[in-house]
Image (cartoon, grey):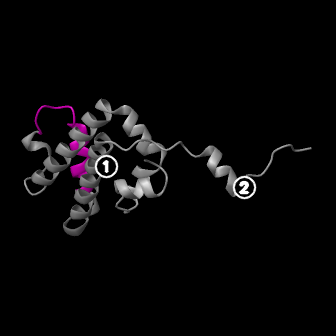
Amino acid sequence: MNNASTSSPSDEKYFSPPPFKMTDKHELILENTRQGNQWQQDMDRGFTKGESCQCFSRAGLYKDADEFPVGAVNERLFPHAVGMWVILKESDRLHKAYPMESQDLDRCGAFRDLMMGDDITKSDLISSGKAY
């Protein structure tokens, strides 16, 4: 006999993460994520997927370096790779400096929603009950 119960919509209130107090730190992290999304949209408009991937992967490869190496990508891609490198460095800094705020945003699905193209704002998180 199977004792497993099926979940019902009312179960969501028991398994949803508790709302969190939205702070300026959360806003900084969300803005950095928006910048990354904007970078990707800009790359999608003028470059191939391969070029976009090359910029992103090189930016990640040199994320911990003090400066982005001139020869890491070709001259045409260089400013775009540097742009992503700056965004990734700041993302790394923010997530290390504010781990609890990063976890709040991850648990409530804000990162997922932003990556799916939704522009999540402080008022969206508050009106949805995910933050206050």
Residue 101, image x, y percentages: 37, 38
Viewer-proximal residue, 131 or 114? 131
Residue 108, image x, y percentages: 48, 48
Residue 51, image x, y percentages: 22, 57
Give me the residue at 42% from left, 54% from top: 125
Point out the image quarter for the N terminus.
top right
Give me the residue at 15% from left, 54% from top: 80
Question: Which picture quadrant has residue 89?
Answer: top left
Q: Secondary structure at mark 2?
A: loop
Residue underneath mark 1: 30
Q: How many numbered marks, from 0 up? A: 2
Q: Is residue 76 left or right of residue 53?
A: left
Residue underneath mark 2: 8
| Amino acid under disc 1 | Leu
Residue 7, image x, y percentages: 73, 52
Residue at the front extreme, as displayed: 132
Q: Is residue 81 left or right of residue 60?
A: left
Magenta stretch containing residue 130, yes or no?
Answer: no
Q: Is residue 83 left or right of residue 9?
A: left
Give me the residue at 32% from left, 35% from top: 95
Q: Earlier in the sequence, mark 1 or mark 2?
A: 2
Q: Residues within 10 Å of mark 2 (few under 14, many from 20)?
A: few
Magenta stretch containing residue 54, yes or no?
Answer: yes
Question: Which picture quadrant has residue 48?
Answer: bottom left
Q: CA distance from mark 1 to mark 2?
A: 32 Å
Q: Which residues are magenta?
A: 52-68
Q: Secondary structure at mark 1?
A: helix
Residue at the bottom extreme, as displayed: 45
Q: Are marks 1 and 2 in contact (CB under 8 Å)?
A: no
| Amino acid under disc 2 | Ser
